[in-house]
Amino acid sequence: MSIDQIRNEIERIKDNESKLYSYLYDLTYQEITPNVRFLETIYSRFLEDKRTEIKRVAVYCLLFGLQIRKLEYKKIALADLDDKFGDSDLRLTCASGLAQAYQATYEEDILSVFYSIFNDKDADEGIRTECFVGMMKVHGLNSTEILDKNFNKIIMSIDDLHLENFEKEIYEIKDLIE
């Protein structure tokens, strides 16, 4: 499919949220075009979209799918993640996208937001859990290492977490961000 065909299709369906969401998602995962720079221009224009689902798919594709590390995308994702009154699905997408794009980078600003949300006992449990896993990934652990440290138990909620096995990492993160 050509770049013009993709642009025309997006223009044609831009007002239909569900069709646009699916199309944007498919652009990355069905490899409709290998042109990452073009895809980035498509997704970045939807980061300010008023429709939460469209913004969510844009964040997801830029950070999780394409794993693009740009200050502008990181700032947007961190702001949405840190918005306690924001859409929970968007917040979860921002956390997982940041963790994927910035895995093993030790990015202090990301670790700081993840750490703060994880330690906020009033925060949504799912977002706290995602922030913990994201914090470990940005700190350098991969999914297998997280699973191994957690007694081979997938961390789906705070209750699944064997926090005592992550004391070293938490101490290192705390030391880095303070």
Image (spheres, rainbow, N blue to C red):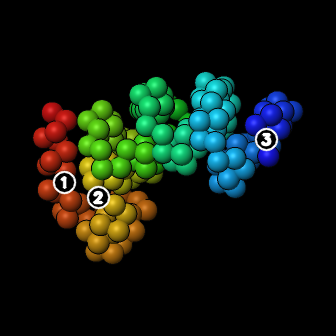
Residue type at tag 3? Ser
Of mark 2 and mark 1, the one earlier in the sequence is 2
Q: Please, what secondary structure does the residue beneath circle 2 have?
A: loop
Q: Residues within 10 Å of mark 1 (few under 14, many from 20)?
A: some
Which residue corresponds to mark 1? 169
Vertical placement of residue 177 versus 129, above or below: above
Residue 9 appears in view: yes
Q: Please, what secondary structure does the residue beneath circle 1 have?
A: helix
Q: Please, what secondary structure does the residue beneath circle 3 have?
A: loop
State the image coordinates of residue 18 (x, y, percent, origin top left): 77, 43
Which residue corresponds to mark 3? 2
Q: Marks 2 and 1: CB-CB under 8 Å?
A: yes
Which mark, residue 4? none
Question: Residue at (19%, 35%) from the top-left corner?
Answer: 177
Question: Residue at (59%, 41%) from the top-left corner?
Answer: 36
Vertical placement of residue 90 versus 141, above or below: above
Q: Residue furthest right?
A: 12
Q: Marks 2 and 3: CB-CB under 8 Å?
A: no
62 displayed left or right of 158: right
Which quadrant of the structure image shows residue 150? bottom left
Q: CA distance from mark 2 to mark 3?
A: 39 Å
Which quadrant of the structure image shows residue 90? top right
